[in-house]
Image (cartoon, rainbow, N blue to C red):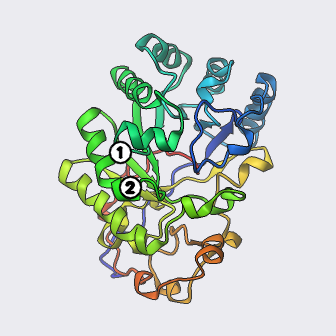
Amino acid sequence: MSSTMPVAPARPKPQAYLRVGYACNGRCTFCCAQGGWSRPMRKLEELKQEIDKMVCEMDLESISISGGEPTIHPDILEVIRYCKQNAFRNIHLNSNGREFKTREIVGRYVEAGMNSVMIGIHGPNRELQEGIHRVKGSFDQMVTGVKNIAAAGLFHRFFTVICKANMDHLPEIVRFCNDTFHGFHSMIFCYPVIKELEGFDKDSILIPYSQVQPRIQAAIEKGIELGVRVQAQLVPPCLLGEYHYLATEIRRPDFFASEPTHTKLTSFIEEDRLLLPTCRSCEAKHFCPRIQYDYVRYFADLPADIFRPLRDLDYRRVSMDTVSERNIPL
């Protein structure tokens, strides 16, 4: 790196991660929680004990609450209140948005302490969104929920998993969000965590990086055109080319969960990721999510022309909120 170039921004403080259970009111085709949709949610006391343990073991200010779908947990408001009582400054929910049916409902979550939401949007229209979410009527429910969240002035952003069903519609998803919603912070397009797809029909979900590259760049460029911040997650930054600074991992915090079965979803595990020989001279290797070994096992092909080392990275293009302290876990 040139001596005149700014250094990489510091990573935010670690965040807590709490999975309240796997039960969900959706049936997304790519969801790693599929095997647990019908399982009961975790008990309130168990969740409180986990929160207590995280608070005791680490200096944490932010917590991300996930599922399944956390809003269908019968005690979700009490869980949020308990997080607030334990001095969590940022309390974030990962949700499909469908249970935020009225402004009054959103108000209860705000009163409990929630101040940030990530909403999953996987298609730009009813047909594609419901084809992936696999629940009739869910598209309109999601739209209503997002508008109610925005009306409450909550920090919110969108999250899209890149899959075969939507891969040719990423710029359309950006335009749909821009045209339909107001006041959202950003959008994140994420490549699937392949090891969580064991037992799935991977042929109907996964696409190779060579097909991801032009599509994610097109989505970013549509965002630039419309004034929407579009980022990429679990996509090697070299695939983003000149837009490498929009990789969420640049300022991605470490996530901490006391329960071992959750930990694998909240941190990058080096032994599960591949660093190519050509990657060793790349200046982005310290924040690159690298290549999943399961990707190599599945596609058995790593085209050298798309994995090119990045050099002379200009971190001045990375705003301090590229990945805010309200960032989501994997």
Badge number at residue 231: 2
x and y, in percent, of residue 73 in the image: 67, 24
Above or below: residue 137 compared with residue 232: above
Of residues 326 and 231, the one nearer the viewer is 231
CB contact under 8 Å: marks 2 and 1:
yes
Residue, disc 1: 186
Above or below: residue 152 compared with residue 64: above
Image quarter (top left, top right, bottom left or bottom right) of the N terminus: bottom left
At x 78%, y 49%, the residue is: 261
Badge number at residue 136: none
Q: Please, what is the three-letter code of the amino acid marked with disc 2?
A: Gln
The kind of secondary structure element at disc 1 is: loop
Residue 175 shows in this picture: yes
Above or below: residue 302 compared with residue 129: below
Above or below: residue 327 compared with residue 220: above
Q: Please, what is the three-letter code of the amino acid marked with disc 1?
A: Ser
At x 21%, y 48%, the residue is: 227
Residue furthest toward the top? Answer: 104
10 Å neighbourhood of mark 1: few (<14), some, or many (≥20)?
Answer: many
| Left or right relative to 208: residue 85 | right
In the picture, residue 177 is in which quadrant?
top left
Residue furthest toward the left? Answer: 225
Looking at the image, how many numbered discs can be counted on the residues? Answer: 2
First in sequence: mark 2 vs mark 1: 1
> How much space separates mark 2 and mark 1, taking CA atoms?
8 Å
Residue 120 shows in this picture: no
At x 74%, y 29%, the residue is: 41
| Left or right relative to 69: residue 139 | left
